[in-house]
Image: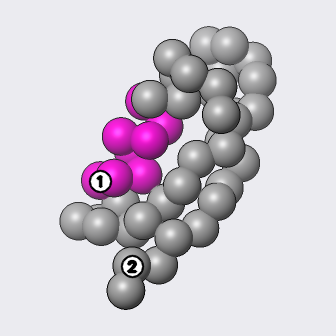
Amino acid sequence: MKKISVREFYYPRTGKWYRFTDTRINGGLLSRVCIEIVGWFSI
């Protein structure tokens, strides 16, 4: 099974903290994608 964790992420452009899931696949590629998504949508 995939290890999924929820983290807090600070987005400098909006100056807000966001939460995103980190599935740790392909050396954290997914986590980076999540960060980009959070830039548009706050979870």
Along the polypeptide, which appears first: circle 1 or circle 2?
2
Q: Which residue is outermost to the left?
A: 26
* Residue 14 to residue 11: above or below: above
Classify mark 1: residues with Cα within 10 Å, few (<14), some (14-19) or many (20+). few
Give the amino acid at mark 1: Leu
Q: Nearer the viewer, mark 1 or mark 2?
A: 2
Image-quadrant location for residue 28 = bottom left
Tell me where the magenta segment starts and ends, as one range: 29-36
Which label number is shown at residue 29? 1
Residue drawn at point x = 39 percent, y = 79 percent: 2
Q: How is the image coloured?
A: one colour
* Residue 18 to residue 42: above or below: below
Image-quadrant location for residue 12 = top right
In this rendering, position of residue 13 left or right of residue 27: right
The reply to whether the C-beta atoms of the residues labelled 1 and 2 are less than 8 Å apart is no
Q: Which residue is outermost to the top?
A: 13
Q: Position of residue 14 (x, y in %)?
A: 68, 13
Helix, strand or loop status at disc 1? helix
In this rendering, position of residue 27 left or right of residue 22: left
Classify mark 2: residues with Cα within 10 Å, few (<14), some (14-19) or many (20+). few
Give the amino acid at mark 2: Lys
Q: Position of residue 9 (x, y in %)?
A: 66, 42
* Residue 26 to residue 12: above or below: below
Q: Which residue is outermost to the right?
A: 16
In this rendering, position of residue 40 left or right of residue 13: left
Residue drawn at point x = 48 percent, y = 37 percent: 35
Which label number is shown at residue 2? 2
Residue drawn at point x = 33 percent, y = 52 percent: 30
- Alpha-carbon distance for marks 1 and 2? 14 Å
Which label number is shown at residue 20? none
Comparing 18 with 15, the one in front is 18
